[in-house]
Image (tube, rainbow, N blue to C red):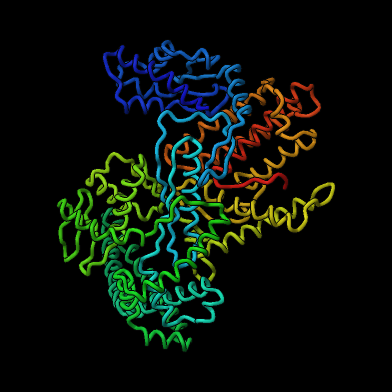
Amino acid sequence: MQILAQIRSRFAPALQALFVSQNQTATPEQLVQALGMIRPAQNSQFGDYQANFAMPLAKPLGLKPPEVAQRVVAALDLQDLCSEISIAGPGFINLRLADDFLRSQANAAWGDAGRVAVGRGGSLPVARLGLTEPVTPERIVVDFSSPNVAKPMHVGHIRSTVIGDSLAKVCRFLGHEVITDNHLGDWGTQFGMIIYGYRHFGQADAYRAAPVSELSRIYRYVRRLMDLLEKLRDLPKWEQGLVGARQRVADCQAELAAAESGADKAATKAARKQWQDAQQQCEELQQKITAAQQQLRQAAQDEALSRDLVEHANLHESVLAETSKLHAGDEANVQLWQEILPHCHDEIERVYGRLHVEFDHWLGESFYHDALGPLVADLQARGLVRVSDGAQCIFLDDFPAPMIVQKRDGAFLYATTDLATIDYRLKQWQPDRVLYVVDHRQSEHFLKLFAVAAHLGYGQVRWVHVSFGTVMGNDGKPFKTREGDTVGLEGLIDDAVAKALEVVTQLDEAKETGPEFSPEQRRSIAEVVGVGALKYGDLSQNRTSDYRFDFDQMVALDGNTATYLQYSFARVRGIFARAGLTPAELQATPAAIQLTNAAERAVVLSLVRFQDALEEVLVDYRPNLLCNYLFELTQEFSSFYNRPDCRVLGVEPDLQRSRLAICDLMARTIETGLALLGIQVVEKM
């Protein structure tokens, strides 16, 4: 049910007629903007929906805001949808849905027994709930997660993975054709690190016993060596820079003293700002030097590590050489890559399995390698590239730096692979829209990529960078372990499940009739609750913002958490158990939903807004809007259920069936909404 879309469609001709009456023609932008200002009312005392476009339209139309509202209302045809239409204040148009219409929508949603598949290959069918198909369904490619497979997935992968998965599910639910693609990093420098490390630092017995663990150890060790070697190289430059930074602080301090002796307050303020900036730069450089010196002292105490730093002093160049040999088809390196890659795939697939995330395709960087040379040749033939400092570059308006597609040594870059990926997707899948769910640090890259795509003739496709912020620790810095390492994703899942097990155990042991779950059942429920808490804790945040990771908050039984929603779902299911009836048995009987009081009406109104909430998610690709809807719906239902005049059981039969139908629709909406976030429910908690 697209109630908001229906209302906006009724306003559109009235708005166009208003412009015509003033000898004007509404531009598409004006119409979209005005219709976008028709929203659910923030305060129910003003009605169910409110149109707030009168004030911004008044000036261009040469009318007063109340007159704009009056003329639009006079031309509206909403009799079958609304019982009241009123104008308040400076032209606010308030709408109240007719109870008959509201009942019909609720009964249609409750009586819809259909299912919609929102997973790969038709998996994960969820309730239709009166879903209206889109007028123009699109084919949408969602590119998300995309880890480098030569190293374990970490906390930095959680956002792309869960946001992309949820957007794909919402798009499918709303009737679009969706193609998901995990663009794996399976061909880059990290494999050069693994190949070099395997040959020089690998332990054969450990690899045979646990290949993924050994490959992870090798990667971490090579990464550590490269970091230490980089610090050994850069430390003298930093120390020399510190001397200059201290001199700048002294110079700025002298300038400040001179300024303070005069009467020019602006000059004094500017001098103080320069002195403070110089101090901050000096302190930051000193901290970097101190941290590097400490790490190098610790390394010096490790005999094997110190030896390897000497013996592999050219490690960076060696890794690049192994990577180049792999890309050039070196038989030994390709054979080792082919042996290692399946183990890496198994590892990340296991993590995806716990997160209940699926993909239609796993087309990594290696898939496009053979297309990169021809791509650059095609760009050259089109006159889109020119040589700069030996590299093949695409220069774009509005960007100071070019997009490099081939380095002077002949190596290709991520940008080259991304262009080849665009070419493949356009030829194979012909999408209408492509979503790249990638963190905000890649914003400039995607702006350039989309600009090049337009030059290549792919401007008819909607290219969208769905960016997101960083997962932070309680210290306000990127979430790390105590040792300063990036937190592993599977370890994070384990910790979330362990925290959920505490909550599930407490709930079970606090039951008046005594615990009802076995240890195995508790662990099974905790897996669902813990994974749900982890995913919802991310999805409930505004995706463009950084957020602080807090396990206790994520599994709380109150507030906007998955645990609260899952618990609410289980409580609604408990109502049916007390009624001695299953939802399926109720659905097999006629149970017309009634509206007998304001609380009942309010929860039904929230329920029939489900599809509108989902449509809003796709306006700017924000799953947190679905989280907000589910939380507010659950609060509305709780207010309804806890009122003495809204008892579900023990009332006359027709009213009981009506209220059980509301409970059933509530449970199915929560279950479907959570499924679209990639989160499961449990029947009991």
- Residue 385 location, quadrant: bottom left
Left or right relative to 210: residue 261 = left
Identity of the residue drawn at 70% across and 23% down: 591
Along the viewing direction, whichever of 178 and 570 lies nearer the viewer: 178
Q: Is residue 474 visible?
A: no
Q: Residue at x 29, y 53 (%)?
A: 419
Taking 610 as reference, is 432 left or right?
A: left
Question: As drawn, which residue projects farthest toward the right?
Answer: 513
Based on the displayed image, in which of its 4 quarters is residue 278 positioned?
Answer: bottom left
Residue 65 visible (yes or no): yes
Residue 557 image position (x, y, % from top left):
67, 47
- The relative height of residue 389 versus residue 657 in the rendered view (above or below) is below
In the rendered image of this protein, does residue 155 appear above or below residue 140? below
Question: Relative to residue 345, is residue 578 drawn left or right?
Answer: right
Q: Can you give x and y, in whole percent of width and height, for residue 421 in the image?
A: 33, 53
Residue at position x 51%, y 37% in the image = 173
In the rendered image, residue 245, in percent from the top left (x then y), is placed at 30, 71
Tally of numbered tags:
0
Name the spot of residue 279 as percent of width and height, x first. 35, 67
Viewer-nearest residue: 315 or 108? 108
Of the pair 548 and 62, the residue shown nearer to us: 548
